[in-house]
Amino acid sequence: MSSNAIPPANLSTPPNILRKIGLVLFSALIAIALTGAIYQIRATRHDQRAYPMPGRLVDVGGYKMHIDCAGEGSPAVILDSGLGDGYRSWRKVQPQIAQLTRVCSYDRAGVGYSDSSPKLRTSKVFAEELHALLQNARVPPPYVLVGHSMGGYDVRLFASQYGNEAVGMVLVDSSHPEQEKRLPPMLKDLDRTWIREQEFFEFTMPFGLPRLLGFCSRDGEERAAECNFHSVRESVAELKSISASAAETAAAGSLGNMPLVVLSQDPDAPQYDLPEDLVKPTNEAWGQMQTELARLSTRGTRVIAKNSGHYIQLDRPDLVVDAIRKVVNEARQPPTPADYN
């Protein structure tokens, strides 16, 4: 080979160049994350200035919970929301009930304006925390308890644990302790998908991605309260504990002769979140379980909310108001011998 030959080019990238590229990419990710976090903080503060928190925060033993009460009278109506939902789910019901008696909505610990709780996130604990909240907020019994979806577990356990403090109940398309084994098995795949979605929101919420992508509520007051990391984290925890909550509720027993109305969604209403082949078997199983809930009390009745989906308090608030009014009026009257049959 000639001494003047040109040596072949070194096609490998020097290690220091790779380190620089990695550092640039890492710095870019950090910058994006910080920008997202700043966006989330500023947007949350803007929403909360525009829509100030109603009600007040009450200490329940080292952490505070949010409660919003209106009206006067007895028994007081206590509104308990479904899984991951806050006080705003009752916005179409509470103002009307306030004309009848005292009524309170609240955020479970970890949801909305309430601080996170160090305790397990099961319905037995939710009932205990609600009891402490009502005591410390000086909302005296007796209570008519209204529970939507998973909130039905909470109010049933409250009635079981605190005896004569509960004098009536309205279950709004309430969960049933046996639903996991009696609904179509394919629904478990949908539940797992829901958990993965909520875990994605939990991971990305501090960086503002769900807000940026429009997954936060269009309702300003709801967005101000719930478009935050701790609310999504609580939703995930409640989802993962739903089986334990069901088992706790199954052991709660009957409601005796307590005035009870069970409101159920319309099986003929569109259900866009279910595959078509699952609609009929799901509705049949759900309807049977709703009938069983009405049998928890000798004074139980069931009402199907026509033209309503699962959120009856939003789709047909008139029916929820009528049911609460009926139960409040019955609770104000002494039971007759027929009520025990």
Image (cartoon, rainbow, N blue to C red):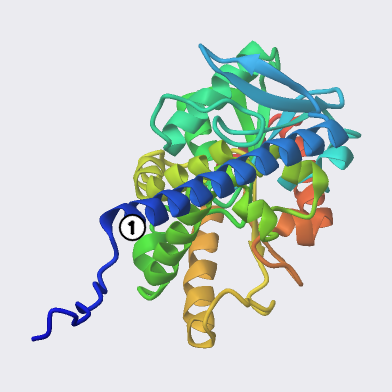
- The outermost residue toward the front is 3
Residue under the image location 68 percent in, 79 percent down = 270
How far across and down, in percent of the image, does residue 237 sit? Answer: 43, 43
Is residue 309 left or right of 122 when viewed as pictured?
A: right
Q: Position of residue 38 (x, y in %)?
A: 66, 38
Q: Amino acid at mark 1?
A: Leu
Say left or right for 74 vs 14: right
Q: Secondary structure at mark 1?
A: helix
Residue 256 visible here: no
Q: Is residue 77 above or below residue 321?
A: above
Relative height, residue 151 to residue 180 (above, below): above
**Front-most of 58 and 307?**
58
- Toward which corner of the image does residue 13 lie, by quadrant? bottom left
Residue in the picture at 91% in, 34% down: 99
In which quadrant is the N terminus drawn?
bottom left
Image coordinates for residue 57, horizontal then vertical, percent:
69, 19
According to the picture, the residue beneath numbered tag 1 turns out to be: 18
Q: Is residue 283 left or right of residue 247?
A: right
Q: Residue furthest right?
A: 99
Residue at point 69% right, 43% down? 39
